[in-house]
Image (tube, rainbow, N blue to C red):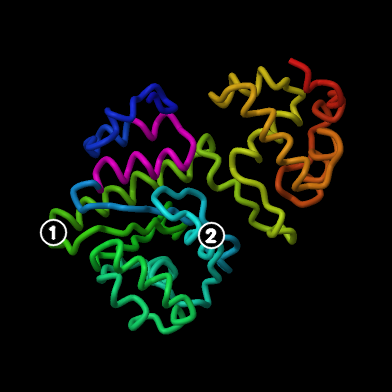
Amino acid sequence: MTLEGGRSDATIRGGTFSAVMQYLTSFPNPDLVTRAICHGPLAQFGCQRISIWTHVDYQELVSVANYGPDEGNVEEYRRIPLNVLVPVTHAFIGSTKVILPVGEVVTQYPGLQLDQSVWHLMEQQSNNGDLVAVPMISNGAPIGAFAFLCDRQNEWNLRNINLLDGLSAAISLWMSHPLSGVLEVPQNSHYAQLALTLRQIKIVKLVQLGKSNASIAANLGFSESTIKQELQRIMKRLKSRTREQAVERCVEMKLIPPPTEKQASIPLTGVHQS
């Protein structure tokens, strides 16, 4: 299997830190980033699943990338208010690493008692392995955090802690780069419940530029059929009948900036034909 950026799954699986760093420079889909990190440098810790969050107005953390089994459980934690103390918000607010056996999470963070059954299942699946949450900082300010679950308890010596610091720096650089698209999560949207995925926001921006499906597919490295399917999802979610209405709706929701004068003159209706 070949991933975005031209790297094979076999190359990333068990890959070194430097291999993942090189992979990040190709700015792949965020979910592929978590896959590469889980199977790469974090594989030595028995990484089972990993999620990356960014903040919205320092009010909540929003999940931007996930990899691992039972993604239905992830759904409950895609948006976490910062006033709810859980390992990942603790790491973000305190700019500190949080490392503890998953079986101790509910005890240490009583706010999670309502989800005790979920955490008990994770404890069983991971053999009470470590849960690790690490803050991410860019230009001296916290921009998010990542957390991963291990299938065992590890020795967190200086070498391993330094690896976490290096990963945090690498992910922060990738996230804060405009080409990653990750920090395009709407920061001031009053329609958070309708927020699109990062890939969908990129597609809408290219539609706003008058690009065809074929052009968008080539630009983002996906098949044309994937772009068509994503556009259908976008229009359904935004309750829009046309691409033009979808773009206008995204501007209203502050998901994308208003068009420039030049962009405003580009007809959007009909350009979906490649």
Q: Amino acid at mark 1?
A: Leu
Q: Is residue 91 depicted above or below 196 in this figure?
A: below
Q: Residue at x 18, y 48 (%)?
A: 44
For label 2, the SS is helix
Whether residue 163 is in magenta: the answer is no
Q: How many marks?
A: 2
Q: Quadrant of the C terminus?
A: top right
Image spot of residue 167 (x, y percent): 30, 48
The span shown in magenta is 23-42
Q: CA distance from mark 1 to mark 2?
A: 33 Å
Chain-order first, disc 1 or disc 2: 2
**Quarter of the view holding residue 222:** top right
Bin the neighbour count of mark 1 within 10 Å (Cα to Cα): few under 14, some 14-19, many 20 and up.
few
Image spot of residue 154 (x, y percent): 16, 61
Whether residue 25 is in magenta: the answer is yes
Q: Residue at x 74, y 29 (%)?
A: 207
Q: Is residue 12 depicted above or below 274 in this figure?
A: below
Nearest the viewer among 141 and 82 is 82
Does residue 206 appear to the left or right of 15 in the view shown?
A: right
Numbered disc in front, either 1 or 2? 2
Q: Main secondary structure of the magenta part?
A: helix
Q: Which mark is residue 158?
A: 1
**Quarter of the view holding residue 140:** bottom left
Which residue is label 2 attached to? 75
For label 1, the SS is helix
**In the current view of this chain or complex, which residue is farthest to the top?**
274
Bin the neighbour count of mark 2 within 10 Å (Cα to Cα): few under 14, some 14-19, many 20 and up.
few
Q: Amino acid at mark 2?
A: Glu
Nearest the viewer among 106 and 217 is 106
Q: Is residue 269 depicted above or below 30 in this figure?
A: above
Mark 1 touches mark 2? (CB < 8 Å): no
Q: Residue at x 43, y 70 (%)?
A: 118
